[in-house]
Amino acid sequence: MERKWWTLIAVSVAIFMLLLDITVVNVALPDIQRSLHSNFRDLQWVVNAYSLTLAAFLLTAGALADLLGRRRVFVIGLVVFTISSAVCGLSGSPLALNLARALQGIGGAMMFATSLALIATAFQGKERGVAFGVFGGVIGAAVAVGPVVGGVITSGIGWEWIFFVNVPIGIAAVYLTLTQVAESRDPEARGVDWMGFLTFSASLFLLVFALIKGNEKGWGSTEILSYLVGSAVLIVLFVVVERRQQRPMLDLTLFRRRAFAGASIVAFAISSSMFAMFLYLTLYIQDVLGYSPLQAGLRFLPITLLSFVVAPISGRLSVRVPVRMLLGIGMLLVGVGLIAMTAVNATSGWTTLIPGFLLAGAGVGMVNPPLASTAIGVVHFTRSGMASGINNTFRQVGIATGIAGLGAVFQHDVTHNTTSALAATRAGHEVLAAAHGKLAGALVSGDVSSVARSLPLSARTALTHAYRVGFTDALTSILTIAAVIALAGSVAGFALVRSRDFVTSGQPEETAEGAPVTVAAA
């Protein structure tokens, strides 16, 4: 087999492992919560620790790869990801797990930032298109099978193995990369924008930290206000730093193209709405409805399989149908799907979610392929790497801030609604009297069952029903918020992404001042 195909295999295996680890974690979260005695904030950080470091390091990792060598950075990322996966599985506390997840995100950023560049270097002409098609199929397959694989592993041999399974795969990928993948770098690379990296990552961390801790500390508290003000100051400083850099980490002039700005908004919207909701939908299906991880994974198939089926159709349509239609209609379907899911109530079964799952799955499949092509298609090919990195950064920032923001509303509403439901009945008053000291903590952690077991039958029944009422009402609230975000993304797709913004080969590139500069055709 030619070396270039081994390159494709090595990159595809690594990215499949990386993406699979994102999707399998969702269905394992309730088991992780029980095993490590985690609270709700800990569960948010299991996902957000990964998303934050992935978003923060993605563009910096790309710059390092151009400077030091893409294969070298890719292998370092593989090693970091593999070692941190083993540490995740060995973690005995929520803090240890979340720190290991943050390290995973750093390794994942190194792999993600270099994957397309390695493929583009290895393949030329029509074969490059074939290779990118295979790569896209691998991404779709990882998303499609992730919940089921996570359910099988978690139910069969324990949540730790969703991380341990990465170790032999990672070792094989490292060996394959070192022996079969050629090294490449950018001869014009000048260094890394460390000030941009520090200001961006610190601003993002303070924002997410404030959103997660807001309910506990109080939104008007000095601590939370300090985090929010600090985040705002740092993001302003980041913009100032980037505007003065000759080779910035994030080229702000790209946002002068309305279509690029639109694609970035859509990327943020789909992640902060549908993808952020997976955490809360998983908790509903497992903690409230009582399904096992495998049963929960199977119940997500209407979303994952439909998105997998629709994605290649959307990819083919993107050459015949204006991309704005695909992005706009796709995000509209996601928004309507999220609204359809608000039909859940305390007496619903999981089938109530099916119409929303189908609509949202079709919308995700319709959006993903043209979104990726738009991000790089509306800028000159010399900036395609940065454009792709920015789009992926917006996705990860959307997941992190979406989970944190929706979680703040969700945590408050679950506590308030459950307590209100208990106060409305005599048996509920008995619960409040008997478990007053324990109930608040149980509602925050999601471990209501431990409190229920200590109560008499009538009080236990009242608490279980009140919790279902409180949980589903809170779920309805954040589903509505997520739907509004998705619909705003639909408006951005329709309004901003215009066909005339797409760059053709040989088209002049605009400088930061807007003056055209003729660039040779690719």
Image (cartoon, rainbow, N blue to C red):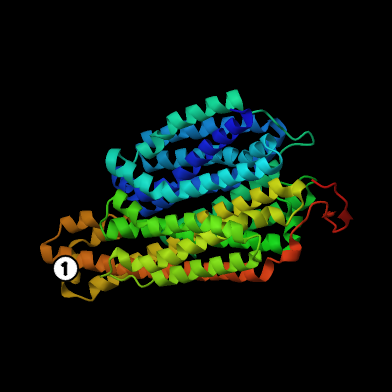
Work out which quarter of the rendered image holds the C terminus and state it: top right
Q: Secondary structure at mark 1?
A: helix
Please state if 123 lies on the left or on the right of 447 as rendered.
Answer: right
Q: From this viewpoint, is residue 189 visible?
A: yes
Instruction: Kindly identify which residue carries mark 1.
Output: 430
Q: Is residue 512 above or below residue 111?
A: below
Q: Quadrant of residue 359?
A: bottom left
Q: Is residue 70 above or below residue 238?
A: above
Q: From this viewpoint, is residue 91 visible?
A: no
Instruction: In this rendered view, identify the residue nearer to me: 290 or 495.
Output: 495
Work out which quarter of the rendered image holds the N terminus and state it: top right
Q: Picture coordinates of residue 521 (x, y %)?
A: 82, 47
| Label 1 Cα crowd, 10 Å radius (few <14 / some 14-19 / many 20+) | many
Please state if 343 lies on the left or on the right of 520 as rendered.
Answer: left
At 16% from the left and 68% from the top, the residue drawn is: 430
Please state if 446 lies on the left or on the right of 105 as rendered.
Answer: left
Q: Quadrant of residue 379?
A: bottom right
At 38% from the left and 56% from the top, the residue drawn is: 300
Q: Picture coordinates of residue 335 (x, y %)?
A: 49, 69
At 50% from the left and 53% from the top, the residue drawn is: 209
Q: Picture coordinates of residue 158 (x, y %)?
A: 30, 39
Q: Is residue 420 above or below residue 261?
A: below
At 71% from the left and 42% from the top, the residue drawn is: 125
Q: What is the three-letter code of the residue carrying label 1?
A: Glu
Q: Picture coordinates of residue 87 (x, y %)?
A: 42, 33
